[in-house]
Amino acid sequence: MKHLPRLKQAMSLCCLFFAIQCLADENIAAVVEAESAITIDGKASEQAWNKAQWSLIDKHIVGEYPSSDDFSGRFKLLWDEDYLYLMAEIRDDVLFDQYANPTEKYWDDDSLEVFIDEDASGGKHQFSFNAFAYHVALDNQVADIGPKNSDGSTNFILLNEHVQSGWQRNASPENVITWELAIKLYDDSFTLKGKHTPVKLTKGKVIGFMLAYCDNDGSKEREHFIGSDDIKPKNGDKNLGYIDASVFGKIKLH
């Protein structure tokens, strides 16, 4: 019986570890598996969407916080072995796309920005493929930043093969569009050369994820940038998602 205090101490440590693990799991959003195929048409008519939970796009990143008539958004996620599926409902009173070139100042046009860190490892990714910051434009083209050019300049690229998207404007409620995306996940071995195989998704996988919306009602620069996760500012700046995957939230496939 002389070892009883040690046993109690060990049990207390186990309980503490379990409590910490449970708390950590509460901060990871669960994503259910799609029971049927999802057609990317902006209709979101599949029954599978009914089992997915809504999350809000309501965290301030850049600009003034918009009124609900100007912008509001929410989204759902599903998955199968080939894709992470996203369905977003976006209320936006003005849809604005000022640049015909999809790699020119795409962040100043209305667009969804989908942040993906395939292995949830965090870390810098602005000029690498440790993670992705997909800007999905109103014409469904997908832009990101690649490794720097040979002269050191920023290399804005299209990754249209990574994300399939489609949206439709709803008759009611007014100024709401439904946007659907099918996203292939690539690990950090991805390069711009050669052919790369997307990662197969499985239950239990944890992924770094964040969603945001660039809102511009006709100005030279975007007026609002609102996200799904609350980013702590660094030197007063909360616009860190395109630089550092450590600010992403996390999702777990169930």
Image (tube, grey):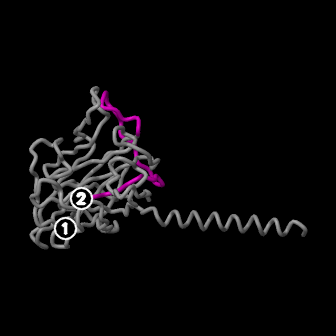
Mark 2 lies on residue: 213
Could you tell me what secondary structure mostly forms the magenta stretch? loop
Question: What residue is drawn where x is 31% and y is 30%?
Answer: 195
Q: Is residue 172 left or right of residue 209?
A: left
Q: Which residues are magenta?
A: 188-212
Q: Quadrant of residue 48?
A: bottom left
Mark 1 lies on residue: 71
Element at label 2: strand
- Mark 1 and mark 2 lie on one chain; the one further toward the N terminus is 1
Quadrant in the picture for the C terminus: bottom left
User: Residue 188: x, y in percent?
Assistant: 41, 38
Quadrant in the picture for the N terminus: bottom right
Residue 8 visible to an observer of this rendering: yes
Q: Is residue 94 left or right of residue 201?
A: left
User: Residue 115: x, y in percent?
Assistant: 33, 51
The crowding category of the residue bearing disc 1, from other C-alpha atoms within 10 Å (few below 14, some 14 to 19, many at least 20), is many
Amino acid under label 2? Tyr
